[in-house]
Image (cartoon, rainbow, N blue to C red):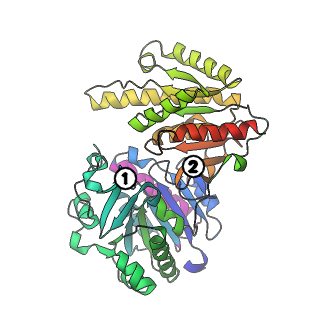
């Protein structure tokens, strides 16, 4: 079987929100290679694996990447024609260098030498694009070089360079020289066309880095098409990208936007649903207030101070009883108290965050047998924990989004019986306008009451 006959797309996603530009693709909520092995059995298939590596240190992140890629290949998926995507943040946070290199190292142990890494952080729907090798983010309606935004001051993955060539040099500690980074410019794409893009990619060898400039989907579609042609001829590439580039890599175009008419809620479920809010970013708090102001949900608050002391078990029992009773008569929003409990000790801060997250998961675990009509999880890490640990979802399918490229609807494929068929919504913390969460709830409520 040639590479042309067996192209498959394995997307290792370092945060649970990366499938927000595609539809009809399965997502594994844990790192067991068995799921992508099954999904990728057919040529031209694609599968996301949620690694959550943005929450891990570099050694743990690279080890997970290698374990999944190696497990998929050892499980019978041909290494030739396997395109591995290291999907990450559109504002350049994450293990940008280490994860693609780990993937290439693992492919090398299976006889595949990677020719080049493509860096394409554009996310069109969120206003992140690259022009002249400089990556921009829309902030308050203005295009701002990404190094000048708050994203660049991330405590773990901060950076100072907006030019992606210089960014790669900075993040690699000089191991990647800026002058050695190749670039596919907008002029190359729009004037030179396929021939020029092919020339650049064909000339990339020995794990060269290639920056992909893009301000619209057509730019990425042309590059993805050339990439597929070269891979069919036996060339090998690894992509590091934000959500948008995954769409043309998977051979999809356009957005699958869901509404109340396209939502299916099984009749055996309750009429009412559950919103779980864990994110503490300012926008999430604003969106939560908007839901509260509409008065369409009953509020149940997890008091963080009680979770952290001897009152924990009793508090959680009371919350579970309250949520289960509430769901019989009303939609319900479960949220952590908005006042952050802080400490100067990083290890202690992490332990506090873990304890609160575990409390959220435990409540969802004990509530899911009530069969809520739907569940919305607000916050990237929250959405992963609620799905994988709270609801027990191992595999789900992306059905579409509530807005193009934002807020995904999942349908569980492998999960406990009481969860199968239940719409599950992944709502990132820093996405949407003030009314977005309330609008999603209204759409789900309309679907539930129309049965």
Q: Residue at x 43, y 43 (%)?
A: 430
Residue 9 image position (x, y, % from top left): 54, 66
Find numbered disc 1 in the image and state the secondary structure of the residue it sits on. loop
Rendered position, 132 above or below 344: below
Please tell me which residue lies in front, 69 or 339: 339
The quarter of the picture where residue 216 lies is bottom left
- Label 1 crowding class (10 Å Cα cut-off): few <14, some 14-19, many 20+? few
Quadrant into which the C terminus falls: top right
In the rendered structure, which disc, 1 or 2, sits on the residue that comes first in sequence? 1
Marks 1 and 2, how far apart at CA: 24 Å
Dominant secondary structure, magenta: helix
Residue 201 appears in the rendering: no
Query: For mark 1, what is the residue?
Result: 141
Please tell me whether residue 272 belongs to the stretch shown in magenta. Answer: no
Query: For mark 2, what is the residue?
Result: 408
Residue 125 image position (x, y, % from top left): 47, 57
Residue 7 image position (x, y, % from top left): 57, 73
Residue 360 appears in the rendering: yes
Quadrant into which the N terminus falls: bottom right
Residue 257 image position (x, y, % from top left): 61, 54
Please tell me which residue lies in front, 138 or 278: 138
Is residue 77 found left or right of 450 in the rendered image? left
Find numbered disc 2 in the image and state the secondary structure of the residue it sits on. strand
Q: Residue at x 47, y 50 (%)?
A: 51
Please tell me whether residue 79 belongs to the stretch shown in magenta. Answer: yes
Is residue 373 found left or right of 146 in the rendered image? right
Please tell me which residue lies in front, 76 or 3: 3
Q: Residue at x 64, y 58 (%)?
A: 24
What range of the chain is rendered magenta? 58-81
The quarter of the picture where residue 142 lies is bottom left
């Amino acid at each position: 079987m040639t590479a042309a006959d067996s192209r498959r797309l394995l997307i290792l996603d370092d945060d649970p929100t990366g499938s927000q530009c595609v539809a009809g693709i399965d997502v594994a909520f844990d790192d067991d290679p068995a799921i992508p092995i099954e999904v990728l059995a057919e040529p031209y298939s694609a599968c996301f694996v949620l690694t959550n590596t943005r929450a891990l240190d570099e050694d743990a992140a690279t080890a997970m990447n290698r374990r999944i890629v190696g497990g998929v290949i050892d499980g019978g998926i041909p290494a030739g024609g396997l395109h591995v995507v290291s999907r990450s943040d559109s504002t350049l946070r994450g293990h940008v260098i280490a994860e693609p290199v780990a993937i290439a190292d693992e492919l090398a142990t299976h006889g595949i030498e990677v020719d080049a890494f493509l860096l394409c952080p554009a996310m069109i729907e969120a206003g992140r694009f690259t022009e002249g090798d400089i990556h921009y983010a829309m902030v308050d309606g203005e295009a701002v070089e990404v190094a000048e935004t708050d994203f660049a001051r991330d405590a773990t993955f901060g950076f100072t360079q907006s030019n992606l060539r210089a960014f790669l040099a900075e993040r690699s500690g000089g191991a990647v020289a800026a002058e050695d980074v190749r670039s596919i410019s907008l002029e190359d794409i729009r004037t030179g066309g396929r021939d020029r893009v092919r020339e650049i990619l064909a000339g990339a060898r020995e794990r060269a880095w290639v920056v992909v400039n893009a301000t619209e989907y057509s730019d990425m579609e042309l590059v993805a098409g050339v990439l597929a042609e070269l891979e069919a001829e036996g060339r090998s590439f690894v992509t590091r990208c934000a959500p948008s580039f995954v769409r043309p890599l998977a051979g999809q175009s356009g957005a699958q936007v869901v509404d109340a008419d396209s939502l299916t809620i099984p009749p055996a479920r309750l009429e009412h649903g559950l919103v779980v809010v864990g994110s503490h970013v300012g926008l999430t708090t604003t969106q939560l207030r908007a839901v509260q102001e509409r008065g369409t949900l009953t509020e149940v608050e997890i008091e963080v101070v009680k979770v952290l002391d001897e009152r924990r078990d009793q508090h959680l029992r009371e919350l579970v009883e309250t949520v289960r009773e509430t769901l019989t008569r009303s939609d319900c929003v479960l949220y952590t108290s908005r006042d952050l409990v802080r400490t100067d000790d990083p290890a202690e801060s992490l332990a506090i965050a873990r304890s609160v997250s575990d409390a959220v998961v435990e409540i969802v675990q004990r509530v899911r047998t009530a069969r809520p009509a739907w569940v919305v999880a607000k916050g990237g890490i929250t959405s992963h924990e609620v799905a994988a640990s709270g609801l027990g979802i191992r595999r789900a399918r992306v059905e579409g989004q509530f807005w193009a490229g934002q807020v995904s609807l999942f349908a569980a494929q492998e999960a406990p019986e009481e969860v199968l068929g239940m719409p599950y919504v992944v709502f990132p913390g820093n996405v949407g306008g003030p009314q977005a969460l309330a609008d999603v709830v209204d759409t789900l409520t309309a679907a539930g009451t129309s049965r």
